[in-house]
Image: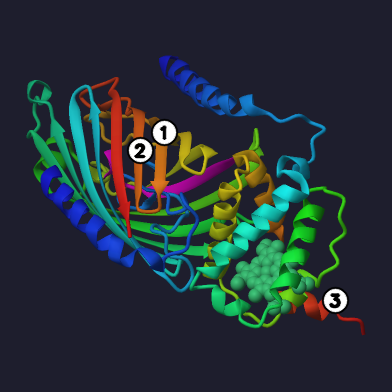
Amino acid sequence: MPELKRTLSHLCLVSVLMLTACAGQTKPDETLYQRLGGLQGVTTIVDNLLYELGSNEKLIGFFAETDIDRFRSKLIEQLCQVSDGGCEYTGDSMAQAHSTMSLDQSHFDSLVNDLIAAMDAAGTPVTAQNDLLSRLVPMYDEVMHPQRYLETDSPS
Amino acid sequence: MVKPMLCFLSLLCLGSAALAESTSKILGTSALSQLEGASGGGIVPWATIGGYGSEGEWGAAASISGVQVDDFILDTGTVLVGVNNRLELSYAQQTLQVEELASGPFDAVIQQQVYGLKVRAFGHLIYERWPQVSVGLQQKYNQNPNIAKDVLGADSDQGTDVYVSASKLWLHALGGRNVLVNATARYTNANQIGLLGFGNADGSDYQLVAEGSAALFLNPHWAVGGEYRQKPDRLSSVDESAWWDAFVAWFPNPRIAVVAAYVDLGTVALWDEQRGGYVSIQITN
Ligand code: HEM
């Protein structure tokens, strides 16, 4: 019985710690786009990301031939779309865009680090950062294994 | 024990500055160094591969930690290397010191060495739908067989733990924060993680035990959480109970992590209600 009591008190402690996280809840009707700071906020995040990439020796090589203006505007559009900002993404599919790169996990990790740094520099709140990352991470498989998607996507 | 480890840590710290640019994993995903040297929480090994080396990279970590409960102190020094975010090799040196007055039939000191191996089988902590799943081994050598075998009746002074861990970090999971959940199943014949030997009078007596951890990242630098580690209770001479902890972890940057915890080790050998504090510092390259 004392074992059980102790177990319960531990569980309580853990759940109290967990509950403290719920304190900073956001207004329910606010979109992620708004929490990212709207068009201005998303633009700042993308510009900061380009700045980070510019000094990322691991990744910079991939962008050697890239039309940066296009990349910038497509990425802004995409972040706006996934954050419910009402934009329509008009760029290539994630499989098409990354089809020739054969990226590995370290490239993906490195880009996520740069994106986090970009959001930090833009003053993006942590919960909005997590929310955006959680919406981008499902694209991992398509970015990393584009061949799987191009085969099934290609019109026969 | 602690002093040479501290020197070693500071050496590593200096060395790590030189190697700093070569690792890519996300802050916090090296995890911490658990008591037996594996990447994990404080007392539970996770499916994480230690260090910040991602695919095509390697990472290393070293830690020192101390547990102080009512009747004894456990100091641990660990080193590990993680390769390709796939393979982890680790080593831990544990020193259990019984408080003089409480020592009874024991020597004042019990030491143990643990060699660890962990392989990530499949999945990814963050990116994939499935949790990251790893399989690990911990080969343990108790240096004081007279206590384990002669006094307590353990079968052996060495043993091998085998475990499977599944870990997943859910982004934006609770109040907009990230949550890490880990479950570990361990097949072991260790008494008090091996500090009191392995098996009992009836032989090796392996058993399957469950371990779990949950942590909430308040932001990328601060996490709070709790852990549970089920323990076998197979020595007839002394009792053994489950371990618990509640921890706060701080990841100021990818070079260093600091953890402080409240631990409840329950009954250990002759002493019950062993509660107290745990502190650990980890340096990463
Ligand atoms: C979830 C993760 C990712 C997302 C959401 C993403 C998004 C995008 C978008 C929207 C474009 C523009 C497509 C277009 O021009 O139509 C693009 C292109 C590009 N991405 Fe990614 N990307 C991701 C991961 C990565 C990673 C890990 C790398 C590694 C270096 C990378 C490198 C590139 C490069 C080099 C281009 C330009 C391709 C070209 O020159 O046409 N991306 N990405």
Residue A10 visible? The answer is yes
Q: Within the displayed image, which quadrant is ligand 1 positioned in? A: bottom right
Query: Image point 56% across, 73% down: which residue?
Result: A104
Residue A143 visible? The answer is no
Task: Give the image quarter of residue B277.
Answer: top left
Q: Which residue is mark 2?
A: B259
Q: Which residue is mark 1?
A: B248
Label 1 amino acid? Val
Label 3 amino acid? Asp
The reply to whether callout 2 and callout 1 are in contact (CB within 8 Å) is yes
Could you confirm whether marks 1 and 3 are on the same chain? no
Q: Which residue is mark 3?
A: A153
Label 2 amino acid? Val
Instruction: For label 3, count other residues whose C-alpha is less than 10 Å away and answer few (under 14), some (14-19) or many (20+).
Output: few
Instruction: For label 1, count other residues whose C-alpha is less than 10 Å away and answer few (under 14), some (14-19) or many (20+).
Output: some
Instruction: For label 2, count other residues whose C-alpha is less than 10 Å away and answer few (under 14), some (14-19) or many (20+).
Output: many
Principal SS element in the magenta part? Answer: strand
Q: Chain of mark 2?
A: B
**Where residue A144 sits in the image (x, y, percent)?**
65, 71
A94 versus B49 height, above or below: below
Task: Give the image quarter of residue A111.
Answer: bottom right
The answer as to whether callout 1 falls within 8 Å of ligand 1 is: no
B156 versus B150 height, above or below: below
Query: Image point 27% across, 45% down: which residue?
Result: B199
Q: Is residue B102 left or right of residue B14?
A: left
B234 or B272: nearer the eye? B272
Q: Is residue B226 left or right of residue B148?
A: right
Query: Image point 72% across, 40% down: which residue?
Result: A35
B214 versus B20 height, above or below: above
| Label 2 to label 3: alpha-carbon separation | 48 Å
> Is B182 inside the magenta-drawn segment?
yes
- Placement of the C terminus of chain B among the 4 image quadrants: bottom left
